[in-house]
């Protein structure tokens, strides 16, 4: 991790297209201005984590639904097999 000291109105660059500027400092909070191309996604870490967790839960739920559907189909096939043998 790179750690830099910046004062109000000072900036730093990431590559050629991203500029981050310290807009304001108040106590233990800073306000940052970020100038980046529109195709660059910028998210607060807590929002990124929440989206990632939500996606993980949705994937697990989809997997559970798929397993339940397969088990239901297996049960139906077994019942059909048993019914056709009688």
Image (cartoon, rainbow, N blue to C red):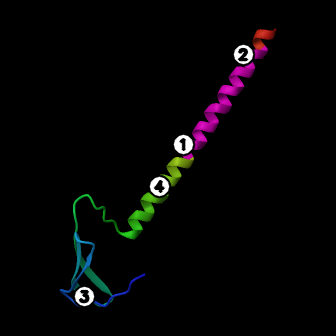
Q: Which residue is found at the position 63% from the left and 38% from the top?
A: 67
Q: Sequence-wise, which precedes: disc 3 or disc 4? A: 3
Mark linked to residue 80: 2
Front-most of residues 18 and 23: 18
Q: Sequence-wise, which precedes: disc 2 or disc 4? A: 4
Mark linked to residue 54: 4
Q: Give the range drawn in magenta.
A: 61-82
Q: Sequence-wise, which precedes: disc 1 or disc 3? A: 3
- In the image, residue 34 lies at what x, y percent? 23, 72
Q: Are marks 1 and 3 in contact (CB under 8 Å)?
A: no
75 vs 61, left or right, is: right
54 vs 79, left or right, is: left
Q: In this view, does 82 lie above or below 52?
A: above
Mark 1 crowdedness (10 Å alpha carbons): few <14, some 14-19, many ≥20: few
Which residue, given by chain and number where applicable, does mark 3 sit on? 25
Q: How far apart are marks 2 and 4 (CA)?
A: 39 Å
Q: Which residue is found at the position 49% from the left and 59% from the top?
A: 53
Q: Are marks 4 and 1 in contact (CB under 8 Å)?
A: no
Q: In this view, does 8 lie above or below 40?
A: below
Q: Quadrant of the N terminus?
A: bottom left
Q: How far apart are marks 4 and 1 (CA)?
A: 12 Å
- In the image, residue 78 lies at what x, y percent? 74, 21
Mark linked to residue 62: 1
Q: Which residue is found at the position 33% from the left and 88% from the top?
A: 4
Name the chief secondary structure element in magenta: helix
Give the residue furthest to the front.
16
């Amino acid at each position: 991790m790179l750690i830099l000291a910046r004062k109000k109105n000072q900036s730093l660059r990431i590559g050629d297209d991203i500029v981050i500027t310290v807009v304001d400092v108040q106590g233990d909070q800073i306000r940052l201005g970020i100038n980046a191309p529109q195709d660059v996604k910028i998210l607060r870490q807590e929002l990124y984590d929440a989206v990632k967790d939500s996606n993980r839960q949705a994937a697990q739920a989809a997997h559970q639904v798929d397993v339940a559907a397969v088990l239901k189909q297996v049960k139906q096939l077994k019942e059909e097999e048993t019914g056709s043998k009688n």
